[in-house]
Image: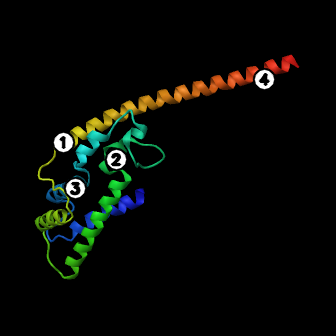
Amino acid sequence: MLTSEKRFYRKITDIYATSVDYDPTDETSILFFKTVQNKVHYAITGQTASEIISSRADSTRPYMGLTSWRGTKPRKDDVTIAKNYLTEPELLALNNLVEQYLVFAEGQAMRRVPMYMKDWIEKLHGFLKLNDRDILTSAGKVSHELAVETAEKHFDEYKKNEAKSLDTDFDTAALSAAQIAKKKVVKKKKQ
């Protein structure tokens, strides 16, 4: 799933890279991408990326509520990425929406229609409306900084709980092994 998710986000970037005024190093372009990403997240989940992180990060849930991460277990940098909390149906809906939009963008490019970032925002709104999706009209209720802080606090607690669980599992296994060994000794003495 992780590879397809990377391709999916790359496709979003590819759409906007066709903008006449797109510069990947410019702060305006970076803000533009974050805005678009939030609009797409909101269209699928009803939450911005920060709201997804803040509401779904939970140290008491398995894997902290994450549905995907790099490696064999979640790391701190995984918990601050909204897409890592999306369910499979949400990821499929997101991918479907972006695929449709990508086909539209390719059509614009083939017809050589010059597009600016503001044009893409307008087209995105129209596209979301056409797909009966809600359109994000604000920055959301949770800042990126608060979402990161919340997720990292939950991660620290999750790691503590995981360490306690491992200790308990080890103690239980060691006790069981000791009891089995003791029973074997008792059986041998009886024989």
Q: Secondary structure at mark 2?
A: helix
The residue beneath circle 2 is: 85
Mark sitting on residue 184: 4
Look at discs 2 and 3 and give the one toward the viewer: 3
Look at discs 4 and 1 and give the one toward the viewer: 4
Label count reads 4
Q: Residue 70 versus residue 90: which sits nearer the camera?
A: 90
Q: Residue at x 12, y 68 (%)?
A: 119
The residues bearing labels 2 and 3 have C-alpha atoms spaced at a distance of 16 Å
Q: Residues within 10 Å of mark 1 (few under 14, many from 20)?
A: some
The residues bearing labels 1 and 3 have C-alpha atoms spaced at a distance of 18 Å
Q: Residue 37 versus residue 32: which sits nearer the camera?
A: 37
**Tag 1–tag 3 contact (CB < 8 Å):** no
First in sequence: mark 2 vs mark 4: 2
Question: Relative to 84, is 124 on the left or the right?
Answer: left
Q: Residue 189 versus residue 109: which sits nearer the camera?
A: 189
Identify residue type, mark 4.
Lys
Position of the N terminus, as image quadrant, is: bottom left
Q: Secondary structure at mark 3?
A: helix
The residue beneath circle 1 is: 143
Q: Secondary structure at mark 1?
A: loop
Q: Residue at x 42, y 29 (%)?
A: 160
Q: Residue 127 versus residue 27: which sits nearer the camera?
A: 127
Identify residue type, mark 3.
Ala
Mark sitting on residue 43: 3
